[in-house]
Image (cartoon, rainbow, N blue to C red):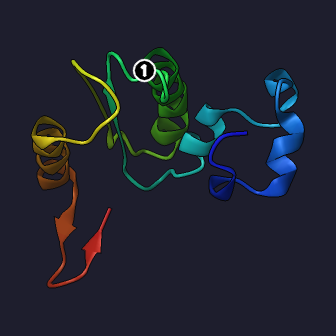
Amino acid sequence: MRFPAWFTPRFATYASREDDLPIDQHHLLAALAPRSLYVASATEDDWADPVGEYLATSAALSAHRVLANARVGYHLRPGGHSLGEEDWEHILTFLARHVKDDGGSRTC
């Protein structure tokens, strides 16, 4: 497994057995509801699987809608695995639209 520090040791038992995982990415994204969710993706980011990211975000949207929270955002930009100016512009636009200023603390 690459980057073992990112995962618990038990996760390594699912190497080459991804279909046996008890949850999928969209479950994790749905579990964030009712908090806001934003996913930034890139067309050539094979590490992150942009198609999978889009599908997971779309699938998680139903859980957010059930909780009356449609504060879900996604963008796909050209390029590879990085976080650049274009990403930050999209993220900051989303935050400006969906994050309420309550006098100092930020809530989503």
Q: Which quarter shows the C terminus?
A: bottom left
97 or 2, which is in the foreground? 2
Of residues 89 and 100, the one nearer the viewer is 89
Q: Is residue 98 left or right of residue 9?
A: left
Quarter holding the N terminus is top right
- How far across and how far down the image is residue 7, in percent? 70, 53
Residue bearing the label numbered 1: 50
Tell me if residue 45 comes above or below residue 68 in the rendering: above
> Is 105 on the left-hand or right-hand side of 101?
right
- Residue at image location 80% in from the left, 46% down from the top: 11
Type of residue at label 1?
Pro
Q: Residues within 10 Å of mark 1 (few under 14, many from 20)?
A: many
Residue 6 image point, x, y percent: 62, 54
Instruction: Please tell me which residue is depicted at 29% across the width and 38% down the height of the picture.
Output: 82
For label 1, the SS is helix
Q: How many marks?
A: 1
Residue 29 in the image: above or below residue 105 = above
Residue occupying image coordinates x 49% and y 22%:
49
Q: Is residue 17 left or right of residue 70?
A: right
Residue 43, image x, y percentages: 32, 16
Question: Residue 24 placed where, x, y %?
Answer: 69, 32
Task: Name the residue at the front extreme.
Answer: 2
